[in-house]
Amino acid sequence: MRRRAIHQGMRPRAVVAALLVCVSLSLAGCQGIPSSGPVNEGLKSLSQADQPVQFNPGGPTEDASQEDIVRGFVSAAASSADDYATAREFLAPEYADEWDPSLGVLVDEGTQQYREAEENVGVLSLSVIASVDERGTLQGVGPGAATEVRFEFAEIGGQWRIASAPAGIILDKSTFAAVWTPLQLYFLSADNRLVSDTRWFLNRATISTQVVGELLAGPTEQMVEVLHSALPAGTALAGGAVPVVDGTARIDLSAELLDADPTTMELVKRQLGASLQAVPNVARFELLVNGSLIDQGPVVAADTTSPTAENLYVAALKDGVFGQIRAGQVTLLAGIGTRIAQLQPSAVTLAPDRRSAAVLHQGIVSWVSPDDQVQVDLRGGLLAPSLDRFGYVWSYSSASPGEILVTKPGERTVQLQMPWLGGRQPVAVRVSQGGNRLAVLVVDSASPEQSKVLVGGISRDAAGVPLALTGAASVELWAAGTPIDLDWIDDERFVALTRNGVSGKVTQGVLGQFAVESGTVPGAVAVSGGGIRSLLRVLDDDGRLYSPQGSGWQRQLDGIALVAKVG
């Protein structure tokens, strides 16, 4: 009854956010940040700065008001020491054991308004900006999202205590950033290429256990048809933990691992080596089965889809010449530059290897190679196309809402449904560098002055043939202003361009993380991620091309008719 009463006091969005989230905040062995006390001497050793931190709030004070009890409880729940012992001091004895902090975490801006709703009932109003679910996946919340959570009180020995509270915990953004960290887990695409997936983990000594546990759990529900794990089904941690001894993570697994053939074992090692590379103080790992060593390997950075050295350039159209920008000049791109320029394009997307292109020209999408030119989409209302690493052209037309045409010239054409568009009309549709995700820039249906980026997964077979889009997409970015353009920077980062007045607002997003505002460019009309962060460019309506410079943008070249995208 108590939990139902809590949910009745919350808005629908709040209920969804609260139930999305399931985390554990055990920070045993962490250094503490006291909530009061004198200023102490600094660290004697700089290595101490790498230690995880924990907040050490105090318990309830004598004769505290109901509001004080609520605020003290919320503050105390930032520390999980002794199974949230301090937070439980604010609860009535019969409820202290019932309260479950693992059922929800909301991240808010830090402005928490309290009001008395009725006798012995208080409500805390939050400005929620994100939630983190039980898999460590962060989901942002749109601007202005209000959440109300309800608290009921009982008088115990003349002191107010909480008799009913929202399951889970509430953290302001600064506290969240202090005790959580984003890491990249790596799963495998259908062609066994490593693909990153951002997860948030607590900064604690057991982070290696958390990482391996999530790899064993496999991809999230949204991406389970896109990615897979090489670890055999049913494999579990034999000892329940992954200790780190002298820089080596000892991963003791159940006997199912013995079912892996040599090829699969190499994939398992690639996954583990890439996923553990960001874990502090881990340089190697050992694979054991019931205590017996069966394999081992180094912790290494994952292979990437970043452009090779010879492809580290920005391509553009200037004075009828399409080519790469070097030393302030546009030099004809060998093989396809002349063909592209002759089409008088309005948008160009180069393949990741820069040897072919998808071109929007005179309302038509064509594929261009050194030896051929093929019209692949003649529908009206076409957006700038994508061209993935498998050679497929992706073209979206407003004439066929809710689906996207995928064509491999000379081989096949398929139409994939985009069920998560919900009737919204995209302004830009882009395929990620690795070819595993599709990003769409749309107007926020709740506010025409806001834009958002939806990201869904692309299911393929082992040959790279697109089979379907995932049934759901996540909102990975909200940005102020009406939508203009979108592009991927690399396989994890993307950039959105929105209009605020006469300026183009640049916002960079990272999958599963908070977005970063990156300044404005007056009159901006297009953005190119370039395939790597250093190649990010913005074009304005007077043909001026801008590159990032510190926290702003530097004018690089004039007279540019268009800047090409990649992938």
Image (cartoon, grey):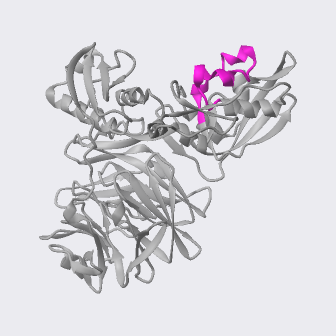
The stretch of residues the image draws in magenta is 77-105
Which residue occupies 60% across, 40% down? 175
The residue lying at 34 percent from left, 55 percent from top is 490
Q: Is residue 72 left or right of residue 364?
A: right
Position of residue 520 relative to residue 254, above or below, is below
Image side of residue 358 versus residue 132, left or right: left
- Vertical placement of residue 475 versus 508, above or below: above
Query: Which of the pair 446/207 is nearer the observer?
Result: 207
Name the quarter where the N terminus is drawn.
Answer: top right
On screen, residue 131 versus residue 560, left or right, reads: right
| Among the 4 quarters of the image, the one containing residue 463 | top left
Q: Looking at the image, can residue 544 be seen?
A: yes
Q: Position of residue 532 (x, y in %)?
A: 32, 60
Please tell me whether residue 422 is drawn above or below residue 41 in the rendered image.
Answer: below
In the image, 60 versus 149, the foreground residue is 60
The C terminus appears in which quarter of the rendering?
Answer: bottom left
| Vertical order, 106 against 319 (above or below) | above
x 33%, y 78%: residue: 362
Residue 86 covered by magenta stretch = yes
* Magenta segment includes 338: no
Q: Could you say which is closer to the camera, residue 308 or residue 282?
A: 282
- The residue located at (82%, 21%) in the rendering is 154
Q: Which residue is the extreme one toward the left?
A: 371
* Labels in figure, total: 0
Query: Can you give x and y, in whole percent of width and height, for residue 544 in the image?
Result: 41, 80
In the picture, residue 66 is in which quadrant?
top right
The image shows residue 404 at horizontal and vertical percentages of 36, 57
Residue 422 placed where, x, y %? 51, 52
Q: Is residue 346 visible?
A: no
